[in-house]
Image (cartoon, rainbow, N blue to C red):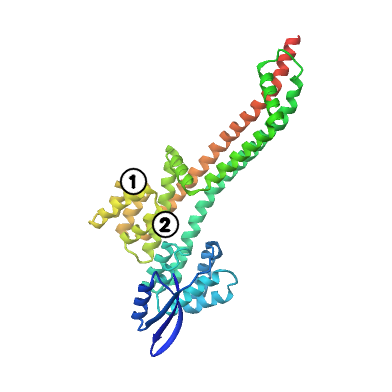
């Protein structure tokens, strides 16, 4: 919540704009800074879409300015001054927090709609070591790698969706234009074959109620698309989809890729193993998250990471060996990143295999549907010609 406050500090009244969950938190914070709250008024915060603030661009620019020798406040002020979109409001709130003496991680924590928990944890770990630019570099590299994996998955789905769309358009064209026109050939004939009667029946149905049928089909498609955009339907379909044997293993592989890369990032930033795993747990699906919670209990009791994670199905054969090497050599963060790379490679092979198998099967299915309609169109002609001999 945003407050416009009047405070008494060092015998002077000042007006400030501050963020706090409630007035009690606001009063405690000001008291810790030696100020007394005189009045507080809630402000209506201007709406700002998450897409208006480019986190990746902000991170890259901040890294460049910090490496150029600017202080954190100077760097953020420079970015705010050159910002011409809604992101300037976010940067202004960061600067206000820094001038109040708050650490950057706490300031970012007050804006969870723009900064994910992993980003905040990365900044918080860097504040302990004093190497913020290096930590942000690791986070940017992490996001780039994850974005690459997601891009591969999306690219693998684009071609099938295009084929389904084109095939569906051809089917509608045949059903609502070609068949009604073609069926008129059989209208004056008697003793028609079954295929011709079927074509004639559909043609008459389209001529009499074609607009309603076509509108119903389009409306159904639109309704399905709208339902698929709702979060509850998406979650239900995803759960059903992931229950398929092969897809379940691919989902596990993708989740482990994100998990190991996140843990490696946090370990490199100075967090403990348990803290890093607890923060990375949010990236795992429900069943794997429960398994990780049990694994963390075992690790807290003194058991090794390389022995615990395999017991709960949170490793691959390669990552299990790499974790053991990392514990022995003291390079656990590096080994976690290498484990993620091996998972990436396995996922790449799985995506390639999926596209090689699914695309021909999809083409065959659509070809059979269209070929079936064409066959029904011409089969009566062949039967009538055979009867005339």
Which residue is outermost to the top?
A: 389
Asked which quadrant contains residue 331, the reply is: bottom left
Decide if residue 68 is in sight here: no
Which residue is outermost to the bottom?
A: 11
In this picture, residue 132 sits left or right of residue 173: left
Whichever of labels 1 and 2 marks the residue nearer the N terminus, that label is 2
What is the total number of numbered labels drawn onto the structure image?
Answer: 2
Q: Position of residue 269 (x, y in %)?
A: 38, 66
Decide if residue 61 is in sight here: yes
In this picture, residue 340 sits left or right of residue 88: left
Q: Position of residue 323 (x, y in %)?
A: 34, 54
The N terminus lies in quadrant = bottom left
Circle 1/circle 2 CB separation < 8 Å: no
The residue to which callout 1 is attached is: 313
Tell me the crowding category of disc 1: few under 14, some 14 to 19, or many 20 or more residues within 10 angstroms, Cα based: few
Q: Is residue 119 above or below residue 100?
A: above
Tell me the crowding category of disc 2: few under 14, some 14 to 19, or many 20 or more residues within 10 angstroms, Cα based: many
Q: Position of residue 163 (x, y in %)?
A: 62, 39
Q: Mark number for residue 261?
A: 2
In this picture, residue 21 sits left or right of residue 363: left
Q: Is residue 304 above or below residue 110?
A: above
Asked which quadrant contains residue 97, the reply is: bottom left
Q: Mark number for residue 200?
A: none
SS type, badge 1? loop
Measuring 52% from the left and 62% from the top, which residue is drawn there?
50
Q: Marks 1 and 2, Cα distance to the nearest angstrom?
A: 17 Å
The C terminus lies in quadrant = top right
Measuring 43% from the left and 50% from the top, which residue is drawn there?
342
In this picture, residue 274 sits left or right of residue 334: left
């Amino acid at each position: 919540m945003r407050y416009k406050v009047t405070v008494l500090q060092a015998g002077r009244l000042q007006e400030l704009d501050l963020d706090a969950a409630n007035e009690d938190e606001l009063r405690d914070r000001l008291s810790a800074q030696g100020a007394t709250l005189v009045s507080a008024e809630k402000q209506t915060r201007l709406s700002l879409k998450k897409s208006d603030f480019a986190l990746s661009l902000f991170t890259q620019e901040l890294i460049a300015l910090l490496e150029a020798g600017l202080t954190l406040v100077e760097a953020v002020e420079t970015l705010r001054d050159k910002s011409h979109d809604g992101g300037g409001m976010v940067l202004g709130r960061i600067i206000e927090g820094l001038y109040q003496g708050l650490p950057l991680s706490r300031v970012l924590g007050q804006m969870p709609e723009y900064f994910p928990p992993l980003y905040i944890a990365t900044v918080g770990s860097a504040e302990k070591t004093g190497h913020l630019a290096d930590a942000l570099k690791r986070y940017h590299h992490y996001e780039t790698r994850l974005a690459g994996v997601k891009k591969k998955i999306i690219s693998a789905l684009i071609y099938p969706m295009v084929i389904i769309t084109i095939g569906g358009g051809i089917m509608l064209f045949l059903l609502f234009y070609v068949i009604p026109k073609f069926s008129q050939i059989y209208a004056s004939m008697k003793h028609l074959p079954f295929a011709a009667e079927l074509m004639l029946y559909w043609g008459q149905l389209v001529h009499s109620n074609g607009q309603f049928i076509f509108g119903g089909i389009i409306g159904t498609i639109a309704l399905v698309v709208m339902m698929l955009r709702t979060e509850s339907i998406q979650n239900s379909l995803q759960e059903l989809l992931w229950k398929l044997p092969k897809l379940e293993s691919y989902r596990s592989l993708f989740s482990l890729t994100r998990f190991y890369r996140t843990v490696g990032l946090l370990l490199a930033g100075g967090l403990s193993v348990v803290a890093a795993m607890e923060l990375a747990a949010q990236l795992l699906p429900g069943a794997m998250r429960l398994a990780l919670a049990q694994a963390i209990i075992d690790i807290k009791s003194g058991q090794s990471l390389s022995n615990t994670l395999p017991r709960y199905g949170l490793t691959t054969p390669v990552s299990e060996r790499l974790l053991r090497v990392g514990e022995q050599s003291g390079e656990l963060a590096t080994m976690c990143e290498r484990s993620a790379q091996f998972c990436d490679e396995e996922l790449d092979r799985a995506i390639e295999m999926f596209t090689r198998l699914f695309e021909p099967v999809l083409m065959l299915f659509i070809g059979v549907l269209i070929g079936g309609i064409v066959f029904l169109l011409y089969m009566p002609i062949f039967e009538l010609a055979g009867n005339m001999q």
